[in-house]
Structures are given as structure tokens and as C-alpha cells.
Amino acid sequence: MKTRVKWGIALRLGLLLASFSVFAAILAGYYTFDSSRERLQGRAEQALLATTHVLARHMQAGFGTVARDTAFLASVAASEQDKSALADVFKASLVTHPSYLQIRFIGVQDFGLEQVRIDRKGDAWIRASEDELQEKAHFPFVFETLALAPGEVYVSEFGINHEGAADAEPIPVFSMASPVVRGGQVRGVVVLRVAAQPFLRDFNTALPVPYGFYLSNRWGDFLVHPDADQSFGFDRGQRILIQESFAPVAALIDGRQQEVVLSQPGTDDEEARVYSFVRMPYGREGEGRFMVVGLSQPLAAVQGEVVSLGNSILKILLVLSAVGVVLAALVSRAVTQPLKAIVQATQAVTLGRAHATLPVHRDDEVGELARSFQDMEQQIHRQMTELNASRGLYAVLCGT
């Protein structure tokens, strides 16, 4: 024989109140987590963007340092006519700056023949002999620099070094040049060639390991990419463009925006990441040249605070749910206890037994019910008393 579970009003009311409490806690926790997640992720993305801006400013400062060194060396060449002394100054500059690859003074005569050239060969600095000096008048860093005013600096695009000796290493470089003016006449140019990788390493080595560093020229060709095979594709006869890998960056190339933040889903080989790119002015003021600087970070790192927040909210949610259940049980008991007392009194009256005091002092509906029951009980008691009295009188009269 099956036993039927008795769902009393106390149990049902307790479950109902507990359900409302838990549902309210879950709803509040969800909306708190959802709004906080968006704010935290937005803050993390803005922090990544701010880091990218700082990196771009540091790079501009680095380019500015090279430009000042180039202008200084040009001023030295303008005042120092002794080639050996000038070569010593060039060599000292190479010793001081590990990223400087080559410094040379190129005259305006003899089709731009090099007058002094110092090359870095590993850890050594070698001055080119007279037979090794070459004509360079046809290169932009010569004929464009000759048109500049004293103190101005020409800045080349980044490219692969194919100039010089046949055994020269084809590495990424860029050049800066400044005119050499003596007695009001342009006598030549000083050209400072910089190895791009050591120069850029000074900026991205300070970045934490999860960061990815990106750099492109004004056309979008990758100059720096976490995957080295993506860099300087134009030197291998192919264009690997940043705007093709990250479509929103096209707005930076076109000049419609100055900064972009985006996210890309993960693949089987790579995790999801968030990216920030900024447009960095490059070269002489007024030229309108620029580079695109970018950083990436795993989306999991950006959402790390979100996960921590979710765990905290879950713990709070469990505590609130437990408190809600306890409060529901207490409220259910407080509401149903007087009703139980009235039920027990009803059963006692039916059996003719005494019962506990009814909650007649309450000012709510339960108090009204208790008072009504008490009045009914008193009325029944009076009627029973009168009935018994009538039966006694009738018995007396019949006996007579």
C-alpha cells in the first residue's frame, strides 16, 4: 500500500517563499555578473589600447632619438673635414648604439661618392677602404636629403637591406639622413642605417609574454608579426597586409580612425585574442606618413577578472539562497503556527477536550479567525449549557 505524502500549507508556503528567494537571488546575480562582465572586459580592452598608445609614443621617442643623432653627426661632418677624425666619431656612435648598423658621409660630387663609411660586422666596427667606397647619388636617402634644410632629417621606409657588399646580410633596416652644410653650401649627407629588429626589440621586450606585437607601414604591409613568416612579404614578391588579417584596421589605413579594438575567435591552433591598433605618425611633420602599431592579448587573460568576479558572485549567490531558504522556513512557520493552533482547537472542541490559548490578540486576518472561532465556541458552549438545562427540567417535570 502506497503512503501518500501530505503537502501541508506550511510546506507548500515554505517551498514557494524559498523558490521566490532563490529565483530573485539568481536573477540579481545574473544581471550583476552580466553588467560587470561588460564593464570589466571594456576596461581591459581600454587598458590594452592605452598600452598600445604608450608603446607608440615610446617608438616615436626612439625614432626621435635616431633623428637627433643623425642631425648631430651631420653637424659634426660639417665642422670636421679630417676623414679619420670623422670616422672615429662615427665608430663611437656605433659602439654606443647596438642597433646602429652603418654610418657614412656621402659627398655631392662624383655621383654621390661615399667619403667615409663605418660598418658593423658582428662585434667589430670596420671602416671601408677607398676601393670599397661606392656612388650613391641615385638613392632616395641622398637626392631627397640634399633638398632638405640644415637640421632636417630624412626618414626612409622600412625594408630589407640589399645594398652594399654581396655578402651583406639581408636584414630589415631603415635609414635616416641629414644634409651636411659648410659655408652655406650643401657638401653632402650623413646617412645612419639602423637594424630594425634590435631597434624594435628595445620596445617589445618589456611586454609580458602573452602580448603579441604588430607593426605595418602606411600601405598595410606587415613589418613585425608574431609569426616571422608574415613580415616583409613584399620583399618576397607577395603582399601580406594587416587590413586583410584584421578588417577593421582598414579604417586606420584610410585615415578614417586613429585607433581600433577588436576580438577574434580562437581556432584549433590559436586561442581567442583581443587586439588593439593605433595609427602612429612617422617621418617628417607635414608628410602625412604613418605606421600602424598593434598589440594582442589572449582573450582568456582579458576575461580573467570576469571569471574571478563570476566565482565571487556564485559564492554570494549560494549564501543568499541559503539565507532565503532559512527566512522562508521562519516566515512559513510564523504564518502557519497560529493556523495550526486553530486547527488543533477545532479538533479538541469536536472531541470535547480543552485546547491551548488561541491567538486572539493578533490584529490580522488570523486574529479575526481566532476571535470568530472563540465566539463560535462560546456560543456553542452556551447553547449546550441551555440544552442540558432544558433536559434536566424536563426530567424533573416528568418525574412529578
Image (spheres, rainbow, N blue to C red):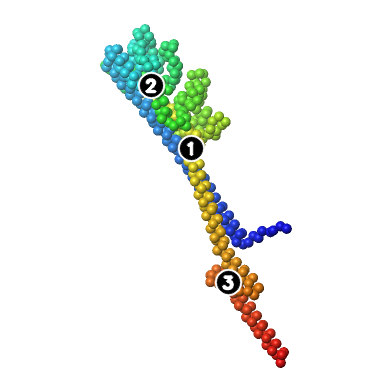
Position in image of residue 218 (x %, y %): 45, 26
Query: Of label 3 and label 2, which has the lower sequence position?
Result: 2
Q: Position of residue 346 (x, y in %)?
A: 63, 71
Q: Quadrant of the C terminus?
A: bottom right
Badge 1, how many Cα within 10 Å: few under 14, some, many 20+?
many
Residue 182: tell me if it is visible.
Answer: no
Count the labels in the image.
3
Circle number at residue 356? 3
- At label 2, the amino acid type is Ser
Residue hosting label 2: 99
In the visual, does 370 lie left or right of 302? right
Question: Where, by quadrant of the figure, is residue 355 drawn?
Answer: bottom right
Residue drawn at the location 34% of the way across and 19% of the way down: 95
Mark number displayed over residue 302: 1
Amino acid bearing label 3:
Ala
Marks 3,2: beta carbons within 8 A: no
Q: Who is closer to the viewer here, 254 or 135?
A: 135
